Image (cartoon, helix red, strand yellow):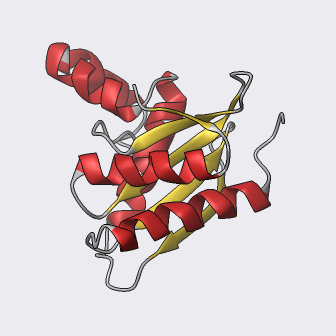
Amino acid sequence: MTDLTLAVARSILDAALAKATDLKLKPMVVAVLDARGCIKVSAAQDGASLMRHEIAHGKAWGALALGIGSRAIFQRAQEQPYFVDAINTMARGALVPVPGGVLIHDPSGVLLGAVGISGDTSDNDEACAVAGIAAAGLKAVTG
């Protein structure tokens, strides 16, 4: 697989939302981006708050932009806050440096895109992203 298809992106989204429902988490927004950073699919559960899409997108977009999961970006922000702030300034504030942005790789390690989720705690957001990616038979990279 060299491209993230719409069908696969939808399956990731559906499995991630199912995981959120199973865990009885707060309403989630899931954004699945392809390797170019373009939205393949995005959805909000009923009751999701206003900025959740932008946050979910920023988690996924930041992971793609830096080539590392947003958990690693979060850790780097703690160690090198000026660097992450500078990168975010260059990105016009589009990067959200907290867990919940997970890279999607195919079984051979090729980057296909990223999932960003927002709605509950960052750890729960990330867990749902990982579950969605795994359900599609792909590899999740959180950090």
Residue shown at the point (43%, 34%) measured from the top left: 91
Figure check: 58 above or below 28: above
Count of numbered circles in the view: 0
> In this view of the protein, which residue sits in the foreground, 138 or 13?
138
Figure check: 60 above or below 47: above
Residue 37 position, x and y percent, is: 62, 42
Horizontal arrangement in the rendering, residue 111 relative to residue 114 (left or right): right
Residue 134: quadrant of the picture? top right
Horizontal arrangement in the rendering, residue 75 relative to residue 106 (left or right): left
Residue shown at the point (46%, 24%) measured from the top left: 68
Residue 43 position, x and y percent, is: 52, 72
Residue shown at the point (36%, 24%) measured from the top left: 87
Picture quarter with the N terminus: top right
**As drawn, which residue projects farthest toward the bottom?**
46
Figure check: 69 above or below 28: above
Residue 6: quadrant of the picture? bottom right
Residue shown at the point (26%, 46%) measured from the top left: 123
Residue 103 position, x and y percent, is: 54, 35
Horizontal arrangement in the rendering, residue 49 relative to residue 37 (left or right): left
Picture quarter with the C terminus: top left
Horizontal arrangement in the rendering, residue 15 relative to residue 44 (left or right): right
Residue 89 position, x and y percent, is: 33, 31
